[in-house]
Amino acid sequence: MLKLREKLISYLEENQIATARNLANFFNVTIANIRYHLKILLREGIVEIIDDVNLGQRGRPTQIYSLSKKEKSTGIDILLRSTLEEIDSIRSDRTRKNRLKKLAKIITASSITPSKTLTAQLGSTIAHLNDLDYKAHWEAHSKSPNILLHNCPYSSLIDSFPFLCQLDHLILNELLGFPVTQIEKLVSLQGRHPYCRFTVE
């Protein structure tokens, strides 16, 4: 189920503009609740105030909200979100995993070039992950190599679609040709950007 902030974004994508009262009435919540979430979206630069109007009522003018220019969805954004919602609606874990496996194969199909050595395969895997903006690297360890992902390309969607973390795992399996296990998730050391760590089995 989408969180309220995600619902606000979807509403503004479809309706272009809204006041806090419009949103409160539509989602059947208090104006104070809506304003709280709008304040967060404003701070994050996802929405903007495009006008202040006086609707003939006493008090402060009514603010009209819209998605910020950088956040307005294209047809591709809408298609992506619809596709993820369809996957999220699958109740069978096995069926959902199979769907994600197919997606991982599509994402990696043009980059799988089997190598004779694990080192070479790790190098090509990291190169492909960085083409996808994962900011990845690998480290040698006594038991097995580790792969670290320092950036999640889907971070803006993870709260709504947490199964995307499983997609990372499947992409790594496809690219490496070896099974991997996630051993750390969103770890942050000394205030650095969080990372996820996988070990090659």
Image: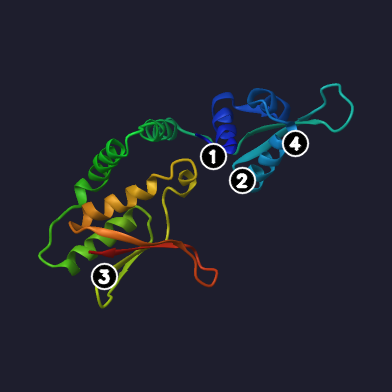
Q: Nearer the viewer, mark 3 or mark 1?
A: 3
Under circle 3, the secondary element is loop
Numbered label attached to residue 145:
3
Q: CA distance from mark 3 to mark 2?
A: 39 Å
Q: Are marks 4 and 1 in contact (CB under 8 Å)?
A: no
In the rendered image, which quarter is residue 185 located in? bottom left
- Pointer 3 or 1: first along the chain: 1
- Pointer 2 or 4: first along the chain: 4
Q: CA distance from mark 3 to mark 1?
A: 38 Å
Provide residue 191's location: percent of width, then percent of height. 55, 69
- Pointer 4 or 1: first along the chain: 4
- Pointer 3 or 2: first along the chain: 2
Q: Nearer the viewer, mark 3 or mark 2?
A: 3
In the displayed structure, does residue 80 sit left or right of residue 45?
Answer: left
Mark 1 is on which residue type?
A: Glu
Mark 2 is on which residue type?
A: Gly
The residue beneath circle 1 is 71
The residue beneath circle 4 is 32
Under circle 1, the secondary element is loop
